[in-house]
Amino acid sequence: MTIRQLGKIILTIFLLSFFTVLTTHNLYHAGTLQRYRKMTLTDDWYRAHFSDGEMEAVEPELSPECKALYRNVIREVQYFPVPESAADPSLTVSYVDSWQAERNYKGTSGHEGTDIMASENKRGIYPVLSMTDGTITNLGWLEKGGYRVGITSDSGTYYYYAHLDSYSNIKEGDEIKAGEFLGYMGDSGYGKEGTKGKFPVHLHVGIYTYNEQEEISVNPYYILLSLDHQKLQYNFTNIMTHRPANQQQEGTRLYSDENNQGRFLWR
Ligand SMILES: [Zn+2]
């Protein structure tokens, strides 16, 4: 065999492997696209990666139902559900992606939300705000969620806020604006009505959609992350200024100054 023949063989082998890799890659890519186009709302990847960078990149390829929920939520959320304190900058919050992390209350289950933890572990001081416009469709005690607020947006998406210490003077059926005060963060839940202190003070945030009768949760973590720079400012301190939910009479409600969005005042 001459050097020239050997060279041809080597070149042929090189080209063959090059095109094999290329074809395999294209097939793989086509297969992945196909997967996004057929994706349903119950898909585990979709629920876990809801609105993260990976999902954003493939958003045009998502199935109509998956794309619709994604776009609705992105459009609807306006404010982070806990404001910054203008009075005491040490009152901060933190949260991590704990999607499907193990939770143990009356059996083991996967965490269907994000827990926003309070730097000051004290119930009744951090205000909880609605992230979106919508209607209050659920209010009151849930064994797991404690004092919770459920807000349904125009698109039918359900935004769930749990473990509150007390409510503002809201009631079921009320129309709510994004940034509106719902109540105070607490540690209620995991027992009969009024149970408090079974875990540290935090706000549990959940986002749900409905497929016929089926309730489907998606990971709110990346949505919260996208709202991290959309925090309102409130004047709250670490002194509780209200009655707990079960003793509440006339609640204290915060109102927004229409001409000065982002600044909320006591009334
Ligand atoms: Zn939680």
Image (cartoon, rainbow, N blue to C red):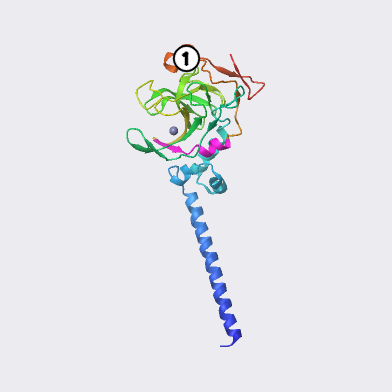
What kind of residue is marked 1?
Arg
The magenta stretch spans residue 206: no
Callout 1: helix, strand or loop? loop
Q: Position of residue 153 (x, y in %)?
A: 51, 29
> Which residue sits furthest bottom?
1
Relative vertical location of residue 45 with respect to residue 81 in this rendering, above or below? below
- The residue carrying mark 1 is 243
Of 209 and 129, which appears nearest the observer? 129
Relative vertical location of residue 193 with respect to residue 225 in this rendering, above or below? above
**Quadrant location of the N terminus?**
bottom right
Q: Quadrant of ligand 1?
A: top left
Q: Position of residue 173 (x, y in %)?
A: 47, 21
Disc 1 CB within 8 Å of nearest ligand 1 atom: no
**Quadrant location of the C terminus?**
top right
Q: Position of residue 75 (x, y in %)?
A: 57, 35
Q: Is residue 65 visible?
A: yes
Q: Is residue 212 visible?
A: no
> Which residue sits furthest top?
249
Query: Is residue 249 found left or right of 76 in the rendered image?
Result: left
- Residue at 63% x, 22% y: name it: 263
Residue 108 placement: quadrant: top left
Q: How many marks?
A: 1
Would you call the spot at circle 1 few (<14 residues within 10 Å), some (14-19), or many (20 or more)? Answer: some
Extent of the magenta region = 214-226
- Residue at 53% x, 61% y: name it: 26
Relative vertical location of residue 19 with respect to residue 246 in this rendering, above or below? below
Query: Is residue 80 found left or right of 136 in the rendered image?
Result: right
Q: Position of residue 86 (x, y in %)?
A: 62, 23
